[in-house]
Amino acid sequence: MYDGIARESAPYLFLGQTTSLCETCLGLVPAKIIEQDGGIYYSKRCPEHGVMKTLVSDDPVYWRRTLEYLKPGDRPLQPHTRTERGCPWDCGLCPDHEQHSCLAIVEINEACNLACPVCFADSSPKRNTHRSLAEVERMFDALVASEGEPDLVQISGGEPTIHPQILEVIAAARRRPIKHVMLNTNGIRIAEDPAFVDALAEFKPGFEVYLQFDSLNDEALKNIRGAALSRIRRQALANLEARNISTTLVCTVKRGVNDDEIGAIVRHALTYKCVRGVNFQPVQDAGRNEGFDPKTNRIVLSEIRRRIVEDSGIFADGDMIPLPCNPASISIGYGVRNGATVIPLTSLVPREALLPALPGVLGAVATSAAVLPWALATSARDLPTSSVRSCCGVMPMAVAAAFRSTPPPRGLPLPNPPGKPLPPAGKPASVRASPIAVSSLAVVMPRRLANASTNF
């Protein structure tokens, strides 16, 4: 019998449901997506370890904005596995995969010349395995079969520069219809071997160095990389600058260690002409992650994005937009650079004009590094398992196409010389200003999958 007691409202707003991981056993568990106390959380329930709640965004307004950038994904031309158990067990790619390989990571070794306390690949000098050139070429061929013309391939490891045939590996990638090749490196060999850097310069254009760059001070580098590397970083950048090799700085952000340097790293990047972008990635609790306390060290994408807006002095809130291929995981901003001055582009184009001009994923990198916009990115790492180890590339031509259809507000300077309109999509711009991009990624990988080989 009704006794007059009023029903109570839930203490949160239910936004949806997804699949996540138990933080104890790493098993797949259902998760409610909820808004509560000014944040977006995954409320998970594991049959063995009970209920847990994980913050995924501290900015509900921006989180809702990410839903406005969803669009159908671009499917791969050819899957390489069958769908039997579902995500993430059939990855490779399986027929159910919702997105093609926007950025393909080809791991050519497990050997490394560092033993970073933070390493989701768990590489170290104790590991000495290198894939053969023939095996790496088969990996490239499998990617081409899946993609046709892959947008972006990142040669990684381990530390790929210590592979005995690294130059042959890069040459093999450049012989294939791959639009842009990146070398993921800690920079030690680039700093210490000028002849090697000369050889890398021969792969331009369409080649870029993805340079580990976590901090400007050695104490933070010791915490994240286990070594005082600031001198190595400076020399590596000097060698890349001398040969004008397109470079993206990649910063792993750990709260309480280097999260106060985000603005400083962006400003430091602008002192080098060769640096075309900066990528901030929150520390990921996978593989090797020594001394990590999630209560004090974990940081989410929305917070890094806010630090970029508040501390960089370049990008405003409207400049850092969700990336359509994975909008909840990646925020990215583009600008045109002239020396240390950057004119942000993305906020000048309304979403309604920009979204139709973009490919299903922004993995398309301009074929000429001379027209890359300066880009800034940031990424989150505690999202659904469907985004395992994917990243973004750069898409200046799509921005240019949308920009042509939507001129900037009156009074704002055009990011190209007067009287020289932006070129048709697909053709390189002839502007003298150097482009730059800033982005942030979310890479999701269960710890037990962290050491699995990812071919594409």
Image (cartoon, helix red, strand yellow):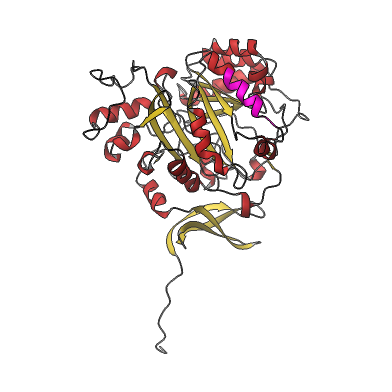
Asked if residue 120 can be seen in this view, the reply is no
Q: Nearer the viewer, residue 135 or 121?
A: 121
**Image quadrant containing the N terminus:** bottom left
Look at the picture and state if 14 lies above or below 136.
below
Count every numbered label the image shows and give the total: 0
Residue 149, picture quadrant: top left
At x 52%, y 52%, the residue is: 19
Q: The magenta stretch spans which residues?
A: 228-238
**Image quadrant containing the C terminus:** top right
Q: Position of residue 354 (x, y in %)?
A: 31, 35
Residue 237 part of the magenta segment:
yes
Q: Nearer the viewer, residue 393 or 81?
A: 393
Side of 356 where 148 appears, left or right = right
Residue 187 part of the magenta segment:
no
At x 34%, y 46%, the residue is: 68
Residue 164, picture quadrant: top right
Residue 438, picture quadrant: top left
Please, what is the dominant secondary structure of the magenta stretch?
helix
Side of 344 where 112 appears, left or right = right
Farthest-out residue, right: 126
Look at the picture and state if 310 lies above or below 221.
below
Q: Nearer the viewer, residue 231 or 454?
A: 231
Q: Position of residue 132 (x, y in %)?
A: 68, 18
Asked if residue 280 can be seen in this view, the reply is yes
Look at the picture and state if 423 lies above or below 37.
above
Q: Position of residue 418 (x, y in %)?
A: 25, 20
Q: Position of residue 190 (x, y in %)?
A: 63, 19
